[in-house]
Image (cartoon, rainbow, N blue to C red):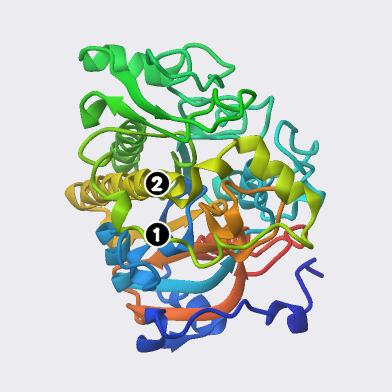
Amino acid sequence: MSRSLHPSIRRIGIQVDTKCDSRYHMPQITRTDTRSEWKMSGEKPNILVLMTDQQRLDTISSYGLNPICRTPHVDGLAEKGIRFSHAFTPTAICSPARASFYTGMYPHHHGVTENGLCLNEGVKGVNHYLEEAGYNNGYAGKWHVDEERTPTDCGFKGKDFLGYAFPASGVLPGLTFGSPPKNSPNPYEVYLDELGCELPKVTKRFVGNNPNCNTQEMFALHDGPVESCIEYFVAEETNRLLESFAGEDKPFFLWSNFWGPHTPCLIPEPYFSMYDPKEIPEHPSYCETFEGKPFVQRHIEKMWGLGEYGWEGFREIVARYYGHCTLIDDMVGRILGTLDRLGIADNTVVIFTTDHGDCLGAHKLIEKGEFMYDEIYRIPLVVSHPDCRAAGSVNDDFVYFHEVTCSALEMAGLPVPESMDGES
């Protein structure tokens, strides 16, 4: 028997503001309806997963919760597919969440219960199952699933980034955030060398006033061409793998991972100045205090050292975070364009999601991890296919981030293993 939640628990959802959520003006479908979409054809589809890091659900404009941030390419995916309104991550910590996606398991089953740990011995990832079904398996961008094993160690084709592995750390002058890849050479540094442009500098740094944490920029300007930024590099790696797989007579699973909009929001123009901080309204819960709440929340607020800046400081961060989201959306557009150019879009399921969200000023907090709020646990999830019969619809069921893995196996014609904690 699968270790999924009891049906009575699975139906529990989080209430949303129906006045501004556009899902109430779109066709509604259920989990069963969604599942039937992937059983239409006997041909195994290609599966492309586009995953961001720490992206709030309300930054995807098709959700109708934010009139400012623009994501036209992901919106286009939603128009051709299904948007999930109540998708949740099992944990709002990077490595445990990503390991859950990779394995289809809860953190206490796969072993990565915090950052810096390794998967339990013998735990299989989605690519291991799909390889048995005849799939090519590729990986691009951020990994952060296992502290000691790289994507290629786990059987993927692609370039490795071991650890948190922020590509620009130790590479771009002016950046103080120091968490470079543990492996060498750094593929991003190699990419910049091959690009041949002048090494971009990092300027206009914004940090908190706590000396212990001001080495991590909340945001900064990547002072160089767009082609030299991290997210463009991820898109290039994704496109390179797509071109490689398109020439082979077998389906592929490609997991493409952007580092943003997780801090530091290191972005070039025009994205750095795309959104005016003065036009960003104060988050409704920013006025909250920490009275009666767990002490850790007050501690985290002091740790980042942003409290004294007030909302005027937070909105500077929000503006660059939105710019980062739109930058990534444009990279999604480039990847989708490659699918079209290669003639493989018609048999490719595209999944857009993220590992968890960000408070981004909600409840007077930034980032995620030590608290449980809707802003960090409820995540965007869009599944798109050109032949989707329910195109433009919304699924209101309570679904889990790691259940996407179960769905990928079913798309490939495989049963969901009992070891996985969920269902398609």
**Residue type at mark 1?**
Thr
Horizontal arrangement in the rendering, residue 90 relative to residue 323 (left or right): right
Instruction: Assign the N terminus to one quadrant of the image.
Output: bottom right
Question: Could you tell me which residue is drawn at 38 percent across and 62 percent down?
Answer: 281
Judging by the rendered image, the residue that carries numbered circle 2 is 321
Quadrant of residue 346 within the rendered picture? bottom left
Looking at this rendering, what residue extends furthest in the left direction? 341
- Nearer the observer, 318 or 22: 318
Contact (CB < 8 A) between labels 2 and 1?
yes
Residues 232 and 292: in front is: 292
**Residue 186, horizontal then vertical, whole percent:** 46, 16
- In this rendering, position of residue 261 left or right of residue 275: right
Few, some or many C-alpha atoms within 10 Å of disc 2 (few <14, some 14-19, many ≥20)? many
x, y (%) of residue 349?
39, 61
Residue indicated by mark 1 = 59
What element does badge 1 sit on? Answer: helix
Any part of residue 279 in sight: yes
The residue lying at 42 percent from left, 44 percent from top is 317
